[in-house]
Amino acid sequence: MGYEVLTAQNGTEALEVFRRERPPVVVSDIKMPGMDGIELLRRIKQESPDTEFVMITGHGDMELAIVSFKDHAADFITKPIHIDVLEIALQKVFEKIRSKRLLAEYTQNLERLIREKTELQNRLASLGLMIGSIAHGIKGMLTGLDGGLYMLESGLKRKDDRRIEEGWKAVTLSAERIRKQVLDILYYAKERELERQQVRVADFGERVAASVAKRMQDHDISLIRDFDVGEETVSMDENAMHAALLNLLDNAVDACLRDAKPHHEVRFSIRPVAEGIRFDIADNGCGMDRETRDKLFTLFFSSKGQKGTGLGLFVTQQIVRQHGGSIQVSSTPGVGSCFGVVLPLTAGHNA
């Protein structure tokens, strides 16, 4: 027949052989000394429900054969055993095993396709919602860009240096806001592979701080750099992490601008911790209540009303998680907020 056969002298020995070898099919007599076939069937089915069982019965054992079916035997054959009958029974159970395996594979593939379809539908729905939510913001950015270009053009015509400078500031600010918005959309709309490289943390921190320093200076907000990392390096996608931390710094500036204190500052700290490197961005701006904090990283939630798109912090969290890191926030209304980002030193620590 071409089958590999394992034998046992009784039910107890058969159970030991089964536990050791795990054959897909067991053929057993109903009546055996010690543990009978029904008990062996029940024990095996309890340990391995997918194992198929063929029972051998005598002519007077039909009631026991029926009991075996209730205990999920696949088939039974009667004595004396004919090879052709045994072959047919074995073919049936092996075909049943193949069918169950194919059904399991089909079910897994179907579940995967359903998950992918659901994820795609959710992403498309979110993209539609995103387009609606950012339309107002984009319009405002373009208006600011047009205003800056008008001031720049009129300043050039009048040879008015002050007007040229103000127009150029407005243009660069609007261009930076548009750039950030586009990057947030791209990060959300298409998950991208990280382009990792070893980055010297102190230099990276300076580059991030430089990106927001001009905006803080224009609004008389003090930027305090507190980098205590020496020559430490981190495996990261620098562009992605730059965008993530810049989002946090910009939010800190926005929080200061919405607050009535006479003096505002943002402290950008970097230091080694047990888990890797920790970046802290703390401000003494307006702060947040607990309800706002709990929703901060929810897609399309913004504490800035129509001025925000609800993408920035969501994207920031995604980038940090892609790096195997974590992000936390603490805040007190009227006092300020602190965002902490911890990154592992190497890619091997990724979640």
Image (spheres, rainbow, N blue to C red):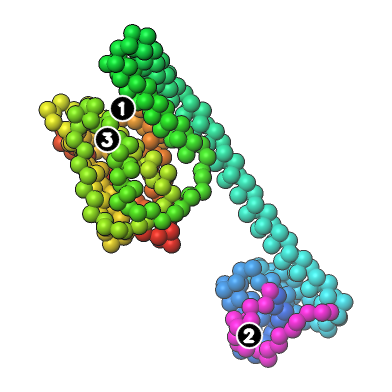
| Residue, disc 3 | 213
Q: Is residue 170 above or below residue 104?
A: above
- Residue 29 within the magenta-colored segment of the rendering: no
Drawn side of residue 10 relative to residue 134, left or right? right
Could you tell me the amino acid type at mark 2? Val
- Give me the residue at 23% from left, 48% from top: 269
- Locate the N terminus by quadrant: bottom right
The answer to whether residue 324 is visible is: no
Determine the CA span between mark 1 and mark 2.
69 Å
Of the pair 255 and 23, the residue shown nearer to us: 255
Q: Residue 214's image quarter?
A: top left
- Numbered mark located on residue 304 in the image: 1
Of the pair 201 and 1, the residue shown nearer to us: 201
Q: Which of marks 2 and 3 precedes in the sequence?
A: 2
Could you tell me the amino acid type at mark 1? Lys
Crowd tier of the residue under label 1, counting other residues whose Cα lies within 10 Å: few below 14, some 14–19, many 20 or above: few
Determine the CA span between mark 3 and mark 1.
21 Å
| Magenta-drawn segment | 1-24
| Residue, disc 2 | 17
Select label 1 or label 2 by which is in front. Answer: 1
- Give me the residue at 63% from left, 85% from top: 17
Q: Which element is circle 1 on?
A: loop
- Numbered mark located on residue 319 in the image: none
Residue 70 spot, x, y in % from top left: 65, 67
- Give me the residue at 33% from left, 8% from top: 158
Q: Residue 244's image quarter?
A: top left
- Residue 13 within the magenta-colored segment of the rendering: yes
- Give me the residue at 67% from left, 77% from top: 23
Residue 78 spot, x, y in % from top left: 80, 78
Residue 133 spot, x, y in % from top left: 43, 25
Drawn side of residue 348 relative to residue 341, left or right? right
